[in-house]
Amino acid sequence: MPRLKKSELSAQVGAVKRGNPDFVSSSFYCPKKVNIQFDRAILTLKANGFEVDRSDVLSVLMDRFASAVDAAEQQGDEVDFESVLAAASEKVLEESAEVSGLRNQLMKSLDSTMKLIEESQQNYEKASQSNQEIISILVRMIPEEQRGKVEELLASREE
């Protein structure tokens, strides 16, 4: 399933979450180390071009967890916390792998683009050098009495 961008999420739920009656604010306590790791992961995603915020990620995780509990309950199984967590995280890992695959494709595309830019720059420099040589040859073909004026004209164009 393709990942929704923050703008797409906002489009689905309205312009903002704050003040939207379809959203509630929740507070959770978690170990400080986990919170810092989570913040670091969010910043890493943002640095790689993925516009997400904490509430988007937590909403997905909470939804996966609730779906896993519902699935276990509907099967009539006794709800086993570890298996519910495993089922919920498996789905998240599958989606993360898709995002990672898309990121790898993007990086390959960027690498290819950078190579093309470098080749274009090299070709431009070669063409520019070749043009300078042609201009130099043509200037030498101009009669002596006119050559000074042409060289002045060329020098003023380079500035």
Image: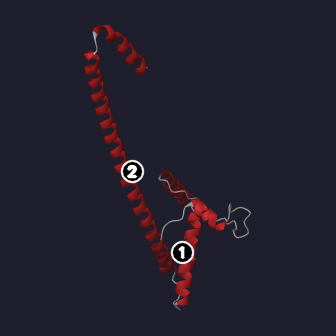
Disc 1 to disc 2, C-alpha distance? 33 Å
**Residue 106 pos. (x, y %):** 41, 56
Q: Which residue is labeled 2 in the image?
A: 110
Return the residue nearer the eye: 74 or 4: 4
Return the residue nearer the eye: 86 or 128: 128
Q: Which residue is labeled 1 in the image?
A: 64
Return the residue nearer the eye: 18 or 107: 107
Q: Is residue 29 visible?
A: no
Q: Name the residue located 34 percent from the left edge and 45 percent from the top edge.
A: 116
Q: Name the residue located 37 percent from the left edge and 11 percent from the top edge.
A: 149
Mark 2 nearby-residue class (10 Å; few <14, some 14–19, many ≥20): few
Three-letter code for the amino acid on which mark 1 is drawn: Arg
Circles 1, 2 touching at the beta carbon (< 8 Å): no
Q: Name the residue located 47 percent from the left edge and 78 percent from the top edge.
A: 87
**Residue 25 pos. (x, y %):** 69, 65
Quadrant (top left, top right, bottom left, bottom right) of the C terminus:
top left
- Element carrying mark 1: helix
**Residue 132 pos. (x, y %):** 30, 24
